[in-house]
Amino acid sequence: MKKHIAFVIALAMLCTIFSACSFVSDTVSVAPESIGDTDVSEQNESQEVSEAESEAESEVVSETPSEPEESAGPREYRIVALGDSITAGYGLDNAETQRYTSLLKSALQSDTCNVSIDNYAVSGHTSSNLLSLLNNGTASTLADADAVILCIGANNVLAPVSSVAYTYLSGCQSTLSSLFAALLKGNDITPYQSTLVSTFNNFAAALESDSTKTAIQNGLYTFQSDLPKIIAAIRDVNPDCVIYYGNIYNPYAQFDVSGIPGVTYDFAAYSDSLVCNINDIIAQNADTLGYTVADVYSAFKTHGGRLVNATLNITTATFNYDPHPNAQGHVVIASVYEEIFDKILAE
C-alpha cells in the first residue's frame, strides 16, 4: 500500500514538471515571434515614409533654379617692357601717353582682359646696360610677367654714328634754310650749296674713318655677346614668360642727299646696312634663345610716311638728324605688337 501511494505521488510530481516545461516552451517560442513581426512592420512603414519625403525634397530641390555663378572678372595679363630710348619714348611731347607701350596697353584693354605694361626702358642704354639692370633686379615685376617686350641694340651700333652726325651736321639746318630762301627769291645758292657739300663730305669721311668703324664693330661684338646673357637673365627670373624682340628700324631712311649736287654719299643706305647687321643677329638667335621677333623694321620700311624725326629734304629745307621715332612712329610700333597680342589674348 505504501508503495502504491509513493508511486502515485511520484507520478503526480512528474506530470507537474512536464506541464511547467510545456508552459515555458510556449512562452519562449511565441512571444519573440509576435514582438518581431510588430517591429518590422513599423520600421517598414517608417522607412517608406522617409523615402517618400526624401523623394519629395529631391523634386523640390531639382525644380529650384540654381544660383548664378559669380563672375570671375577680367583676365589679368602683365607685360614688361625692356629697352632703350625708343621704348622710353624719348622726344615725344608726352611719353606717358604717346609711347608705343602706352598705346598698346590702351589698344589691348577690354572688358574681358585687364592689361598692365611695366616699362623699365632707359634712354641711352646699350645691351650691357640692360644686362646690368636685369642682374640688379631693377625690373621688379619681371617675375610676374606673362610676356616681355624687348628692344635693345640700336645704341650699340648707332651711337657712334649719331655722335659723328652731331659733330658734323649740327649746323646744317641753318645752311639749308638759307639755301631754300635763296631758291625762293631766285638768288644765288652757290655759297650755301658749297657749304652743304663740304659738310656732308666731311661727315662721310668721319663715318668711314677707322675709329668709327672700330667703335661700330665693338658695339656689334658686344651686342652679340650680351644677347644670350640678357635672355638667360630674363629666364632666370621668369622661365615661363614669352619674349618678343622688336628689331630695329632704319632711322635715316628719309635722309635724302640726292638733291645736293656734289654729295654722293648715301647715308640712308649706310644706316640701313648697320641696322640690318643688328637685325640679322636678332633673327639668327631667335629659335636658339627662345624668343619671337616683332618685325618693326619691315613695318617702318613699307609704311611710306615720315615715322622718324631724322629727315633731310632739300626741296622743303627740312633737316633733322634725331634718330628717334615721332608720335606716328610709335603708333606703327604699337600696331606691330597689337597684332601679336590680339592673337594671344584671344586664345
Image (cartoon, rainbow, N blue to C red):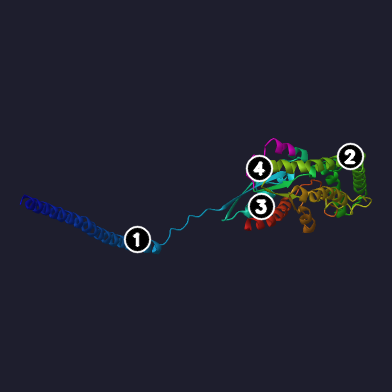
Give the residue pinned by disc 2.
214
Q: CA distance from mark 4 to mark 1?
A: 56 Å
Q: Quadrant of residue 167?
A: top right
Whichever of labels 2 and 3 marks the residue nearer the N terminus, that label is 3
Give the residue pinned by disc 3.
104
Give the residue pinned by disc 1.
54
Depth check, front residue: 161 or 215 = 215
Q: CA distance from mark 1 to mark 3?
A: 59 Å
The quarter of the image holding the C terminus is bottom right
Q: CA distance from mark 4 to mark 2?
A: 35 Å
Residue beneath the point at 25% across and 58% down: 36
User: In the rendered structure, which segment of residues is drawn in magenta?
Assistant: 131-145
Whichever of labels 4 and 3 marks the residue nearer the N terminus, that label is 3
Q: CA distance from mark 2 to mark 1?
A: 89 Å
**Which amino acid does the dot numbered 4 rest on?**
Leu
Mark seen at residue 74? none
User: Which mark is in front, 1 or 3?
Assistant: 1
Residue beneath the point at 43% across and 60% down: 66
Q: Position of residue 284 (x, y in %)?
A: 81, 50
Look at the numbered disc 3 and give the secondary structure of its residue.
Answer: helix
Whichever of labels 4 and 1 marks the residue nearer the N terminus, that label is 1
